[in-house]
Each structure stands twice: as C-alpha cells, then as structure tokens.
Amino acid sequence: MDIVQYVSQYEPLLHNLIVAQGEDWFDYTLGENRQKYANALEKSIVYLVIQDGECVGYVRCVNDFGYGIYIYDLLVHSKVRGNHLGKALMDRVKQDYPNDIVYVMSDVDGYYQKLGYSLEGSIFVVTTDIREQSEQK
C-alpha cells in the first residue's frame, strides 16, 4: 500500500473508486461533472491510497493560504475499510501541513469523532438555486 500525491494520470483509477461507492458519489462522476471534478482535483491537495494497482482510498483538500487546510472528501473503498486507511490519509495531510489547522467538511461526524477530532461549527447552504436547477435536469 502506498500513499501518493494525485496527478492527472490517476484520474481513471480515482474515478473507478468513486463509481464503485454508489449513488452518494455520483455528483462527481456523471456527465459534465466528471470533467468539473477532474478540474477540482487539479486545483486541490489530493492523496491516493494505491494498493495492487488500484485506488482504494483518497482525500481531497483545499489550502486556505495560512488559514487552514479544508478536507472536502475522504473516501475508502468499502472492501478495505477497517484497515485505518482513512486515518493514514488524514495523518499524511497533517504531516505535510504541520503548521496549519486541518478542518473537515463532514457528513459523517461520528467517524472523525472516533479518530479524536473535535466538532467545531457547522455548514450552512446559502445558495440552493444551483442544486435545485441541477436536480430538475
């Protein structure tokens, strides 16, 4: 198992991981969204877990230039969960950005609390028009 920094050549492997995880992740894979997400990956801090030539986990973060590292996506393939790969990815982010606070944009708070991270604040959706328009298509 290796943790590697993302380059665009890994996009097909990452795409396969995301597709394998079901419809909760389809926003990143369907139609024009695949290219949109590939563009986001290019502008983000992304680490992948590569095992036997397959991407089995990843984390995607954004650097707020000294105000923190924000984790937007953390995913480990269901077939290898329980092997601490998510924690290894989080540790890699902390290792590479030791002087930054790391924040997680989470919809699975219990997982991060289990890792010992504290809950601070919340997220509010300010504009829903875009989401509503895409759901109507």
Image (cartoon, rainbow, N blue to C red):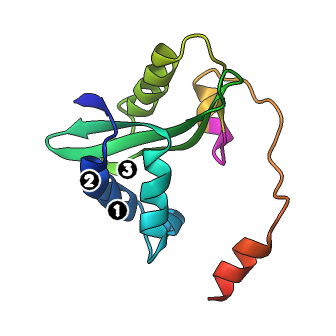
Q: Amino acid at mark 1?
A: Ala
- In the rendered image, residue 19, in percent from the top left (x then y), is placed at 37, 64
Tell whether label 1 touches label 3 (CB within 8 Å). yes
Q: Is residue 11 magenta?
A: no
Q: Is residue 122 above or below residue 3?
A: below
Name the quadrant containing residue 6: top left
**Distance in Å between CA atoms under marks 3 and 2:** 15 Å
> Magenta residues: mostly which secondary structure?
loop
Q: Nearer the viewer, mark 2 or mark 1?
A: 2
Q: Amino acid at mark 2?
A: Leu
**Distance in Å between CA atoms under marks 3 and 1:** 9 Å
Numbered tag placed on residue 78 in the rendering: 3
Q: Is residue 50 above or below residue 35?
A: above
- In the rendered image, residue 113, in percent from the top left (x then y), is placed at 66, 29
Numbered tag placed on residue 7 in the rendering: none
Label 3 element class: helix
Tell whether label 1 touches label 2 (CB within 8 Å). no
Q: Earlier in the sequence, mark 3 or mark 2?
A: 2
Q: Label 3: few (<14), some or many (≥20) within 10 Å?
A: few
**Distance in Å between CA atoms under marks 2 and 1:** 11 Å
Q: Which residues are drawn in magenta?
A: 105-110
Q: How many numbered dots are placed on residues in this image?
A: 3
- Dividing the image into 4 quarters, which one contains the N terminus? top left
Q: Is residue 61 left or right of residue 64?
A: left
Numbered tag placed on residue 13 in the rendering: 2
Numbered tag placed on residue 20 in the rendering: 1
Name the quadrant containing residue 122: top right
Q: Label 2: few (<14), some or many (≥20) within 10 Å?
A: some
Q: Nearer the viewer, mark 3 or mark 2?
A: 2
Name the quadrant containing residue 62: top right
Label 2 element class: helix
Residue, far bottom: 137
